[in-house]
Image: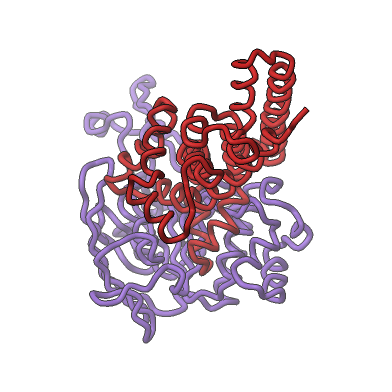
Amino acid sequence: MINIKINKTLHGANGDMNLDVVFDIKEGDFVALSGKSGSGKTTLLRILAGLEESNAVISVGDTIWQDKNTNLAVQKRSIGFAFQDYALFDNMTIEKNLLFVANDKKLAEKLLNITELTELKERYPSRLSGGQKQRVSIARALMKRPKILLLDEPLSALDSTMRTKLQSEILTLHKEFQTTTIMVSHDPSEMYRLANRVIILENGKIINDGSPKKVLLKTKGSQKFSFEGELLEIKKVDVIFIAIVAIGQQLVEIVISQDEVKNLQVGDRVNVSTKAFHPIIN
Amino acid sequence: MNFDPFILSFKLAALTAFILFCISLPLAWYLSQTKSRAKPFLEAITALPIVLPPSVLGFYTLWALSYNSPIGAFFEDTFGVKLVFSFTGLVVASCFYSLPFMVQPLQNGFESINKNMLEASYIAGKSKLQTIFAVALPNMKPAVMTAIIVTFAHTVGEFGVVLMVGGSIPGETKVASVAIYEMVETMDYTAAHIYSALMIAISFVVLLSVYLFNARQNRRFGL
């Protein structure tokens, strides 16, 4: 069991904010951490890693990492960390990046194999694509066989095909190395695919915590379909009104009544839902 | 033609660059990482030799190294080393004189390194020292090169401080710049021409090599 209790005042762009969270994680869990930017997600990861000072009580299994009397240095914590900007050592080849963490050739070979980097191992980071760099970064994070793997929006800079591919690699690695993984993400489908628990932060507090199904599925009551989107435009066509809503990457047209128009403004976040509906998926 | 003053100049510059590199590395690292309020003060002190007239620097160094000051007295009484009008004194004075030329490029270099890269090294279990030598320095080669070469060149080019602290003892403190000054004074223009032309040529080659090296490094890292 990993017990985490953190209290820290953050000086952000929107004034001071108190990061105040208490939660436990079962070992082997894959936790997705989400919330608006500035809600304290990255800071939380950095505190766990020991990169940021804080009033925290962190214990991992029987080991206390941090409390009133102890504060394990970042070097002593069993942590792997993948940064959003990869942060590879530019002066070392891919293989050396891994071996710098731990001089374990067999493990490096295995990780390079899983992440399909074996043929690129002699290359320097400047000659890799974004997806390849992030693979190296995740592989490097696992070279210490860490108890906790922290991923800070690892896939947010990648295109969707690459993202899907890396998601399955991350899942493979998480299972293979039996780490506890905490991943910051904004992508609901990504969280749903990978995590078995989702925590939502807002203004430094946990506002939602549970299974991905419970936290992420937006349908309430008897609705069958429900999508959240942004209202882009309301058009009047003859006697009806048509709203253009952006849902994810798609734009849809929805017929709305005059009464509904009164309560809506362009730019609103809206839910589009329907009941008694027999969809066809093809 | 006697080239001793040149040899002395280069010996002084090489020694100064070496000593300053060792001193400046921890100082520049500290300045690049600290959020302390003392930082601007330390930076201002470090930069002083750039703006001070060499005579001011020379005067204080001369005073501090002489037997009249505790420092000078300590060195002479304990080690029997006379610091003024000696090569050792020149090295000490040059270290003050050229300090900013070593610290500033190194500090800029450390500051240009992606912080996450350093943190990745700490997470990998590496100490600060290991991180500096294995990660930071190899990723800022142009800055290191600039720091060392410019310090070297600046020390070769110093004149006022050297004259005040060292005087002009042949083979001991008579460096190239002082020698040229004396040649002009004694109206030995031929020798002054040769020395000065040599000085320009060497300085140019040194600086050119820095810029060529940096351009090649930047191309390699795709900057």
The scheme the figure's colours follow is by chain
Tell me what residue is drawn at x 25 percent, y 52 percent.
Answer: A10
Residue B13: percent from left, percent from top: 61, 40
Considering depth in this image, is A8 or B62 the residue closer to the camera?
B62
Residue B45: percent from left, percent from top: 35, 38
Residue B223: percent from left, percent from top: 64, 35
Q: Is residue B112 visible?
A: no
Considering depth in this image, is A160 or A37 the residue closer to the camera?
A37
Quadrant in the picture for residue A256: top left
Rendered position, B107 above or below B150: below
Q: Residue furthest bottom?
A: A62
Instruction: Answer with left or right where residue B222 lies relative to residue B90.
Output: right
Tell me what residue is drawn at x 24 percent, y 41 percent.
Answer: A14
Considering depth in this image, is B208 or B49 the residue closer to the camera?
B49
Rendered position, B143 above or below A59: above
Tell me what residue is drawn at x 37 percent, y 27 percent.
Answer: A233
Residue A41: percent from left, percent from top: 36, 56
Rendered position, A127 above or below A245: below
Instruction: Answer with left or right where residue A25 lies relative to residue B193.
Output: left
Q: Which chain is red?
A: B
Quadrant in the picture for residue A140: bottom right
Quadrant in the picture for residue B192: top right
Rendered position, A224 above or below B165: below
Q: Which chain is purple?
A: A
